[in-house]
Each structure stands twice: as C-alpha cells, then as structure tokens.
Image (tube, rainbow, N blue to C red):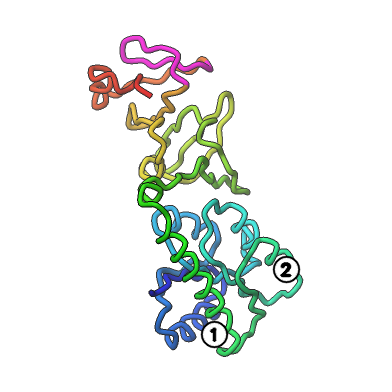
C-alpha cells in the first residue's frame, strides 16, 4: 500500500532532494509540500497523510513545536542539519532522524522503518471492530495563529467566532484571539455539533446561549449577537437551542 507523504521544509533544495529520492521508491506518494510548519497545519486540517518529512528550524513555528500541536500524528521522519535536536525528536516518537546532507541509502533505511510501522498500524486498524472504525474521535481543540504565536484553544471554551473580512476574532468568555483567516475556513473544519452559524459574521457555540429574544441571542457572558435574516429558520425549527 502506498504511503502519502508531506514535505515540510523552508529550504527549496531540501524539497528537491527528497522528491528525487521519493521518485525511486515506488510505495511513496507525494501528497503535498509546505515551506512553513504553520502552512502545514492548514494543509493537514483538510487532508490526511501517512508520512511527514519534517525540518526542525523554521520561521514562526519549529518542527518540534509543530509535532506537539498534532493530536493524531502521522509517521514522522525528521530531516535536519542540526544533530542537537535528535534526542528531543525521538522523545516525541519520530520514526527516524536524518542529518543533512543524507545519502539515498540512509533515506531508504528511514523510509523502510516508517513503512514497517505503517503496515503495523494498518494491521491493527483492520483488526478493530467495524463499529470502532465508524466513530473516529474528533479533535477537541483548534490551533489559532496570531501575529507572533500559535495558540491551542479548546472548543468547549470558545463562545463564538466573529468575522471581520479576512480576519476572525475567536472569542472566549471575556477575551479574543485575532487571526488572519476567513469564517468559512473555520466553519468547514468545525466538527463539533455545538457550533452553528447564525449570521454572516458570527458562528456560535450553542452551549453558551442564555436566552433568545426576537432576533438577538444573549450569551452567558453578557454578549449579544444578531441572528441574520438568512439564518432565522434556526428559530422556527428549534435547532438553535437543541444540543
């Protein structure tokens, strides 16, 4: 079975080397390339991969910090020019640590090691009851990129999302995080049934509704949000208050 691979490295030459090596290994499939770890987080929110080739030292978010943000981790092979991160990488259970520049034979050894782990994972998955496979767990958090950092935010603590053009405010009880994303990018990746869009500019967590009066939702923290005219069927069918 082929392994879908993602390359994450801020050096274009590193991509060229890995792609050239992958071309000679028939069970590796290039699923995508990212030049920032933050870019890879967006990629992985929409697609799944089996194996990641990951650099360590990258702008804004390092490879090791990137690994820590992943709840369900693909197999990871670190590709770095700095050997001092090897111990910490193996503590994060990476498959292998390739020190740049690496030859094809060393790359192949790392890939074969990852392939063995991948096949073992597939065997374990196929042996699980079908009911287990039908109900995969969903992440209980999202990663929000602010100007200087990447913040892990629990979904249960988010009151609502407020759209401001190409920016979104992610509101907690009293404070918010501002991130350069669109409302639709959040809406498409919110798996929790607690969240519902009530306005072109607002996505609401239903658990924090205090009461509804007219076309206004009053939240438990005192906030008031309007219900847009295109979303007022939520009032008539009662889905706004349903858990």
Q: Is residue 214 magenta?
A: yes
In this view of the protein, which residue sits in the foreground, 102 or 39? 102
Q: Which residues are magenta?
A: 208-221
**x, y percent for residue 186:** 41, 42
Say which residue appears at 40% left-offset and 61% top-offset.
126
In this view of the protein, which residue sits in the foreground, 120 or 139? 120
Would residue 225 be found to the left or right of residue 232 on screen? right
Query: Which residue is label 1 attached to?
Result: 108
Say which residue appears at 51% left-offset and 62% top-offset.
74
Residue farthest to the top, as pictured: 213
Mark 2 or 1: in front is 1
Would residue 229 be found to the left or right of residue 90 on screen? left
124, above or below 211, in the image: below
Give the CA separation, mark 2 to mark 1: 21 Å
Q: Residues within 10 Å of mark 2 (few under 14, many from 20)?
A: some
Q: Residues within 10 Å of mark 1 (few under 14, many from 20)?
A: some
* SS assignment at label 1: helix
**x, y percent for residue 55:** 60, 70
In this view of the protein, which residue sits in the foreground, 235 or 29? 29
Query: Which residue is label 2 attached to?
Result: 85
């Amino acid at each position: 079975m082929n392994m879908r691979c993602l390359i994450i490295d801020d050096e274009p030459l590193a991509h060229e080397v890995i792609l050239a090596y992958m071309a000679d290994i028939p069970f590796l499939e290039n699923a995508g390339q990212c030049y920032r770890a933050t870019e890879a987080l967006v990629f992985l929110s929409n697609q799944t991969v089996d194996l990641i080739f990951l650099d360590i030292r990258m702008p804004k978010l390092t490879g090791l910090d990137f690994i820590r943000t992943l709840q369900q981790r693909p197999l990871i092979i670190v590709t770095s020019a700095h050997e001092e991160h090897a111990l910490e990488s193996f503590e994060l259970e990476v498959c292998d640590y390739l020190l740049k520049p690496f030859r094809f034979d060393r790359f192949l050894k790392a890939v074969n090691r990852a392939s063995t782990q991948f096949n073992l994972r597939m065997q374990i998955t196929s042996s699980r009851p079908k009911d287990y496979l039908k109900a995969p767990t969903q992440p209980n958090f999202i990663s929000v990129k602010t100007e200087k950092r990447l913040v892990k935010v629990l979904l249960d603590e988010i009151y609502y999302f407020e759209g401001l053009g190409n920016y979104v405010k992610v509101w907690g009880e009293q404070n918010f995080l501002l991130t350069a994303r669109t409302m639709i990018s959040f809406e498409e990746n919110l798996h929790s049934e607690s969240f519902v869009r009530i306005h072109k500019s607002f996505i609401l967590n239903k658990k924090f509704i205090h009461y509804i009066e007219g076309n206004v939702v009053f939240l438990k923290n005192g906030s008031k949000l309007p219900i847009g005219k295109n979303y007022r069927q939520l009032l008539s069918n009662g889905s706004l208050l349903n858990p």
